[in-house]
Amino acid sequence: MQRTSGDCSLNPNAQIHIVQLTCMPMASLIDGLQGLQREPVNFGTPAQARFIVRMGTSGWMVYDRERKGPALIKDSHLAEKLTREQAEHIKESLTNTQGNDQT
């Protein structure tokens, strides 16, 4: 059988700290939280890079995860059929200019 007292509902089988928590005035709870700073939440999942170097059907390529295919280079060529060194260099230049929308 539950009894109610004002805004709080009391359960005789509940532990006292639960009753105190549910009966705490909302203003007191908010005042207690105002001094705390929110830490950024890190779920442990790093953001994936947009461009990756991987082996294509013939040679190396720079894969664009947004396009879901070979990356486009400034002169409208696809970044495919490359040596690994060329692909790494193109990936670096695309990553450095990604914020400038020059890809």
Image (cartoon, helix red, strand yellow):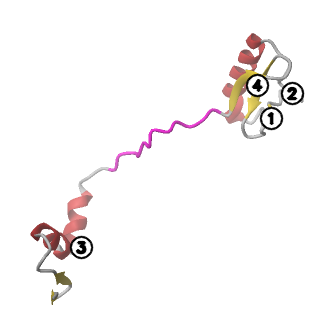
Q: Would you call the spot at circle 4 few (<14 residues within 10 Å), some (14-19), or many (20 or more)?
A: many
First-in-chain label (3 vs 1): 3
Q: Would you call the spot at circle 2 few (<14 residues within 10 Å), some (14-19), or many (20 or more)?
A: some
Residue 57 position, x and y percent, is 84, 22
The residue that appears at 45% across and 38% down in the rendered structure is: 44
Q: Amino acid at mark 4?
A: Val
Vertical arrangement, residue 90 with respect to residue 37, above or below:
above
First-in-chain label (1 vs 4): 4
Q: Amino acid at mark 1?
A: Gly
Give the position of the C terminus as an image quadrant.
top right
Give the position of the N terminus as an image quadrant.
bottom left
**Residue 67 occupies which quadrant of the picture?**
top right
First-in-chain label (2 vs 1): 1
Between 63 and 34, the one nearer to me in the picture: 63
Q: Which residue is mark 2?
A: 78
Residue 62 bears which disc, if any? 4
Is label 2 in contact with label 1 (beta carbons under 8 Å)? yes
Residue 26 position, x and y percent, is 23, 73
Give the spatial CA distance, label 4 vs label 2: 9 Å
Left or right of 7 on screen, residue 37:
right
Magenta stretch, residue numbers: 38-49
